[in-house]
Amino acid sequence: MEFEFPHIYEYQIDSTNRLASDLLSKTNPEHGFLVITDYQTDGKGQYGRFWQSTAGQNILASFIIYPHHIELEQIFRLHLASSLAIVDSLEQFSLPRLRIKWPNDIYSGTHKIAGILIQNNLKAGKIQGSVVGIGINVNQTEFPQSLNASSIQLETGKSISRESLVIKLRQELLRNIQETEDAVWDDMLKRYNEILYLKGISTEFVLFDGSTLHGIIQEVDPSGMIILIDNKQQRREFKFGEIKYLAT
């Protein structure tokens, strides 16, 4: 794959995030620099899970960015911007019910179609640079049943140009990150919550201590905490890592 903006393409690599992180720490790639591959041998997703993908069928990409206007305590803004960038990139395909599953996945209907893994380079409590790893299921048509996954081709019946989608994705990522300035942040958070997966639906979760919790998702707050109402009608707030979905 070739692009007009700065990038590195490798047919096979252990992890695009690993290479992008190395570049970020050792060199000075420009804002929006792309690392992309057709196949990862050690790609990771949320909770360290292996990212399964058929070679040459999907988007496996990592973008190097410098979100200097985002303070460390505002780091959720980067996750939100990345999620909205994927949704904005995919809307052109008229996928059914595009939703953001807190904290790092994009769903079409009830199936996962994309995921995000962000790593930050910190110094003295400041974000020096970030690697936004994005995987999108594009043209793959078979997945292990355990993954509950789908792809653009499965949902639309059409084969999609990965290169064109990467170009659009980069544009939307840089635009959304820039728009996390305070002037438009409230509107972005509102939109995020409007398309929040399973919002208003009773859902079962697992807490960090292994116990389970039934709750109805209300929203995600500006800090990135998910707000639930439990079966005792109590408001509960959880950070990423404190709770995860039991299924879905």
Image (tube, grey):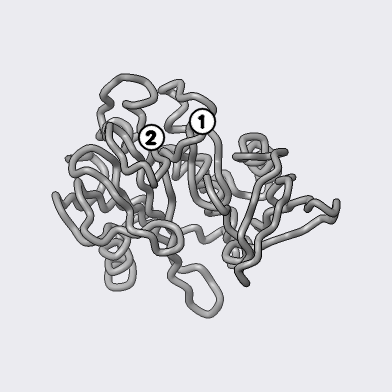
Q: Which residue in the structure is indicated by mark 1? A: 109
Dot 2 falls on a residue whose secondary structure is loop
Question: Image height check: is 213 above or below 127?
Answer: above
- Residue 151: mark in rendering: none
Dot 1 falls on a residue whose secondary structure is loop
Can you name the residue that lies furthest to the left here?
A: 11
From the top left corner, tell me how far across and down residue 35 is, in percent: 26, 53
Q: Amino acid at mark 1?
A: Gly
Q: Amino acid at mark 2?
A: Ser
Q: Which residue in the structure is indicated by mark 2? A: 150
Is disc 1 in contact with disc 2, using a CB cutoff of under 8 Å? yes
Q: In percent of the image, x 31 and y 34: which residue is there?
A: 138
Q: Is residue 75 left or right of residue 135?
A: right
From the top left corner, tell me how far across and down residue 71 is, in percent: 60, 64
Nearer-N-terminus badge (1/2): 1
Q: Is residue 108 left or right of residue 156?
A: right
Question: Image height check: is 125 above or below 235?
Answer: below
Which of the 4 image quarters holds residue 190?
A: top right
